[in-house]
């Protein structure tokens, strides 16, 4: 019994330490070009990416065709995924800008995605309902985007459950 308590305390302490050491979006405040969602996410965008498991092994590859349209301060981002196993997926984001903060929704996002931009970076946090073989898993995403120039953006999203990292998604966006 004591061993279980010590293991639980050690696990909680490890998670606490990891959260204290995390990168903040403000760390990128002086980086250029300044991230501007309205400027970057307009028109057609092509993305290429991989999904890795927790060991770093690539488990899926993907190509994503996106169409981004704005109505006032609201973005509709229509994404069509084609995976290396020929499976397809569609996600339509609705994202509202308020200052340097963004709030987004999509059919498979539980609640709202909340993001903050600073310098060339955007950090999103959200819960994605992922369907695997008929079972839905709610995974926590810590999603980072860094604008490289007016055409290229790099995206890294770690996904976890109960604070344990399960994998990572790496994507390169190219504005057409």
Image (tube, helix red, strand yellow):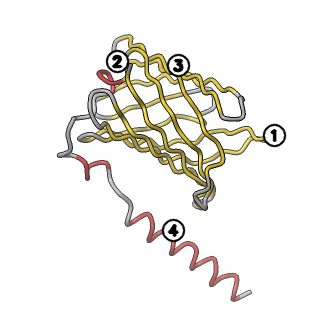
The alpha-carbon separation of the residues under discs 3 and 4 comes to 35 Å
Q: Residue at x 57, y 50 (%)?
A: 159
Q: Position of residue 109 (x, y in %)?
A: 59, 34
Nearer the observer, 43 or 131: 43
Q: Which residue is mark 4?
A: 15
N-terminal of the pair, mark 1 or mark 2, is: 2
Q: Position of residue 144 (x, y in %)?
A: 41, 44
Residue neighbourhood size for the residue with mark 3, other residues' Cα within 10 Å, grouped as few (<14), some (14–19), many (≥20): some
N-terminal of the pair, mark 3 or mark 4, is: 4
The alpha-carbon separation of the residues under discs 3 and 1 comes to 24 Å
Q: Is residue 14 left or right of residue 152?
A: right
Q: Which residue is mark 1?
A: 133
The alpha-carbon separation of the residues under discs 4 and 2 comes to 36 Å
With respect to residue 34, does 175 lie above or below?
above
Q: Which residue is mark 2?
A: 73
N-terminal of the pair, mark 3 or mark 1, is: 3
């Amino acid at each position: 019994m004591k061993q279980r308590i010590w293991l639980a305390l050690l696990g909680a302490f490890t998670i606490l330490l990891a959260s204290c050491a995390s990168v903040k979006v403000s760390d990128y405040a002086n980086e250029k070009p300044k991230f501007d969602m309205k400027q970057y996410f307009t028109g057609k965008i092509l993305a290429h990416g991989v999904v890795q498991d927790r060991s770093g092994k690539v488990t899926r590859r993907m190509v994503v065709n996106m169409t981004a349209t704005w109505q006032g301060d609201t973005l509709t981002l229509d994404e069509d995924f084609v995976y290396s196993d020929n499976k397809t997926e569609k996600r339509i984001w609705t994202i509202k800008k308020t200052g340097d903060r963004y709030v987004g929704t999509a059919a498979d996002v539980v609640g709202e995605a909340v993001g903050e931009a600073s310098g060339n970076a955007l950090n999103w946090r959200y819960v994605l309902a992922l369907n695997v073989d008929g079972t839905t898993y709610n995974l926590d995403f810590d999603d980072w985007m860094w604008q490289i120039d007016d055409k290229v953006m790099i995206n890294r999203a770690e996904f976890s459950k109960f604070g344990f990292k399960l994998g990572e998604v790496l994507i390169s966006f190219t504005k057409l």
